[in-house]
Amino acid sequence: SQELEQSPQSLIVQEGKNLTINCTSSKTLYGLYWYKQKYGEGLIFLMMLQKGGEEKSHEKITAKLDEKKQQSSLHITASQPSHAGIYLCGAPSGYALNFGKGTSLLVTP
Amino acid sequence: GAVVSQHPSRVICKSGTSVKIECRSLDFQATTMFWYRQFPKQSLMLMATSNEGSKATYEQGVEKDKFLINHASLTLSTLTVTSAHPEDSSFYICSALKGGANVLTFGAGSRLTVL
């Protein structure tokens, strides 16, 4: 089965700083999804990547999928307290998604 | 858009009782819904795939008699935790796939606490 490894496990950054979260797959990715979860709440869809080398941006968040389609990164520029939460990468497993363990982000003033 | 509603958001029950959690797709029809479980500080684990009009497909290690899933309509799937025990306490999240879309929409989750 496909395993997704996320790093770091947790991250504390000062407001205004940039940060990067990584997601590495044990197998070739045929799609990679990024979601954000507020503590104790549901998941909010951020972005989906499918092609090797693809990069997408939304507001201050940029996600990339490497050419080999085994690693994705999520980059946040000029972090804000509203970016705090758990970031999860997910890969298709049938019609469902298989998720990594998540990266917990805390943004301090 | 695609909106998925889950109810209740929080439920506390006594050990041995059964609890039903509802998952509704509000503005689209979902032939397939998914139920996940999340333990504190851990990722989401897929429990089962709920198929409208047919039996659910359970992941390995998930007791189908413990976690009853019913998907009687194109907008509603229910998860019933039967004879709940404290170890069943968890955060349960459902998701649905809108026809023609390739993005799963998630409900807000239901936190179950079994005393």
Image: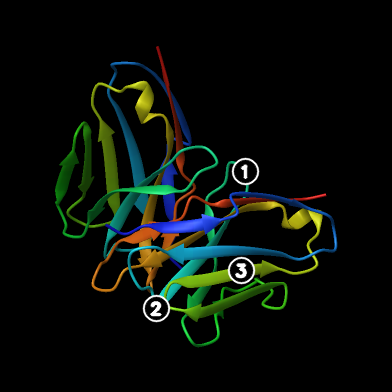
User: How much space separates mark 3 and mark 1, taking CA atoms?
Assistant: 20 Å
Q: Tell me which residue sits at (85%, 58%) in the image.
A: B15
Residue carrying label 1 = B40
Q: Amino acid at mark 2?
A: Thr
Give the percent coordinates (x, y) of residue B40: 62, 43
| Residue B3, disc | none
Name the subunit of mark 1: B
First reached walking from the N terminus: tag 3 or tag 2: 2
Give the percent coordinates (x, y) of residue B77: 52, 71
Instruction: Name the foreground residue: A33 vs A24.
Output: A33
Q: Tell me which residue sits at (75%, 69%) in the image.
A: B82
Q: Label 1, secondary structure: give it.
A: loop
Name the subunit of mark 3: B
| Residue B79, disc | 3
Q: Label 2, secondary structure: give it.
A: loop
Q: Amino acid at mark 1?
A: Pro
Instruction: Name the foreground residue: B110 vs A83.
Output: B110
- Give the position of the C terminus of chain A as an image quadrant: top left
Give the percent coordinates (x, y) of residue A40: 55, 41
